[in-house]
Image (cartoon, helix red, strand yellow):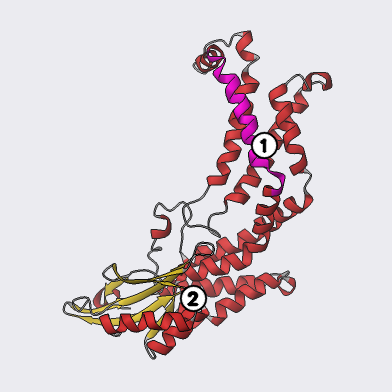
Amino acid sequence: MRTRGGYICHLDATCEGGDPFLMSSIDSLSNIVLGNVKLPAEDEAHIVPFLERLKQAFGIPLALVHDMGKGILAAVASVFPGVADFICHFHFLRDIGKDYLGSEYDTIRTRLSRHGISATLRYRAKQLKREMDANPAMIAAIHHSLQNAPLPPEAFAFTPVVGAYTLIQWALRGKTEGDGYGFPFDRPHLAFAQRLQHLNAEVEKIKDLHLRGQWRDNRPYFKLHFALQPIMKDKTLWNAVTALEAKITVFEKLRKAMRIAVPSGPHGLNDEGGSANIRTIEKRVTAFRAWLSRRTDYPQDRAAGKMIEQIDKYWEKLFADPITVQTPSGPILIQPQYQRRREHVAGVAG
């Protein structure tokens, strides 16, 4: 730690259900875990003893980085008064996104669960798979036809089984869509609902190609269409989907400005953000704030107003100047709240 000029104390706590909180601390310069402890509650009274042990073992940190939890904020101020204190950009964006998108997303999750559509589709897929397994020659003929070979009439009649099965599997895969960041960055329930919409639209196209008397004879698609009708008539669900899609436009604009949890990033929760410096990010967030507050619907949008309140409340801890650390190899600038980034001062002059 001395060779690096000291340590930066990152703090975070996690909890599953009714289990105790697991609080951890890591030095982001050395990637050394400083300590772990189980806590009955994430409050000041229980966090302070943990921080006191860190201070006794490792001394005063160069800076602290954590989320906006009231318990952590109070405990840090008590044990490390005067130490540079920052809000982690990832945690800030995650928490503000949960608040902004949470209501509509919870509605979507609840309505999907109430309809039991996943179980229904899996049951239909299981029946179709059983039918395909019983007719391997038909599957082979369809596969062969993809290589420009003529499709036998009997295999052509079997294609709805394969088609319906494929569409169901595609829709169900929406439930696993995401980049490993968790909500609100990943939104698998919304992705699933959107795929259900697309699935229904495709089945409706097939229905329109059939004469009324022939539609019921196309069992794979007819049964799939019948299974989808209750959920497609759920106005509460689709109103929530429309509202969430509109809010995501706003959230993704802030996400782009902060350059955290980049979509399709390969590192999941280990992503450390882009290469922009803190002043560049601050300018982008300033522009985002101005854009959002100038929208014509802003005065009536309570969720957007709360988002700006949170940005303003934590502005200084989000965009405080980088700290200069004296090391044996010379002074280094560190931006603790943004990423584990350090640069020689000579390399970032100006």
- Residue extending farthest left: 328
Of callouts 1 and 2, the N-terminal one:
2
Residue at x 61%, y 35% (from the top left corner): 122
Does residue 125 sit above or below 38 in this rendering?
Answer: above
Can see residue 335?
no
Residue at x 74%, y 43% (from the top left corner): 231
Numbered tag placed on residue 42 in the rendering: 2
Q: Is residue 61 magenta?
A: no
Quarter occupied by the C terminus: bottom left
> Percent from the top left, x then y, of residue 139?
54, 17
Give the residue type that dot 2 points to: Glu
Residue that badge 1 annotates: 120
> Percent from the top left, x then y, of residue 101?
63, 62
86 horizontally vs 152: left or right: left
Numbered tag placed on residue 162 in the rendering: none
Give the residue type that dot 1 points to: Thr
Residue at x 63%, y 70% (from the top left corner): 292
Name the quadrant containing residue 337. bottom left
How many marks the image carries: the answer is 2
> Percent from the top left, x then y, of residue 129?
58, 25
Task: Describe the element under mark 1 as helix, strand or loop.
Answer: helix
> Percent from the top left, x then y, of residue 239?
75, 54
Does residue 253 sit above or below 42 in this rendering?
Answer: above
